[in-house]
Image (cartoon, grey):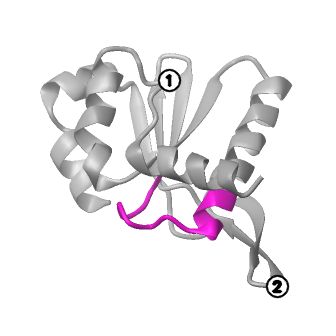
Amino acid sequence: LYSFVTSRRVSEENAKKIDAWIKSLDVGFYSVEYSWRKGEHPKQGSFNPDLFIKIRRDILVVEIKADTDISSENKAKLRYARQHFDRLNELQSEYKYYFKFLSPSSYDLFFQNLREGKHKAFKSNIEAKLDDLDRASL
């Protein structure tokens, strides 16, 4: 996470596109609840997304994981966070929230899409793999 924030965000061309950003605390900042099955046992948890990035009226909510962190738990985090921010978008119109899963292999592509104004539709490698895992379990 540190390398993501320091090495890429601070480049001048990236900084020009970002109005504001904040790295959340590990606990107690902004929590999203989720549930998943671990074997035969239902589990519940909550997580704090790592970053909030403001670009005009868009807020990118970013959870950063390792490239190989494809798991049923992260699949659940993605699904529940999307639902959470979809509901938030329905309840207010001041900002539009977009939840993104991101891993190191997609950092450069993420910022390229951000600079080109394509951040809304951007999907990282890990997010695509988690979506595939979710579709396979339906």
Residue shown at 56% from the left, 18% from the top: 57
Nearer to us in this view, 86 or 93:
86
What mark, if any, has residue 93 been given in the picture? none
Q: Nearer the viewer, mark 2 or mark 1?
A: 2
Q: Secondary structure at mark 1?
A: loop
Residue shown at 82% from the left, 25% from the top: 90
Mark 1 crowd level (few <14, some 14–19, many ≥20, 10 Å Cα): few
Residue type indicated by callout 1 = Ala
Residue type indicated by callout 2 = Glu
Q: Position of residue 110 (x, y in %)?
A: 33, 34
Q: On the image, which quarter does residue 61 sit in?
A: top right
Q: Does label 2 or label 1 sit earlier along the sequence?
A: 2
| Residue 133 is inside the magenta segment | no
Residue shown at 60% from the left, 55% from the top: 133
Magenta part of the protein: which range?
63-76
Residue holding disc 1: 121
Q: Secondary structure at mark 2?
A: loop
Left or right: where 121 falls relative to 73: left
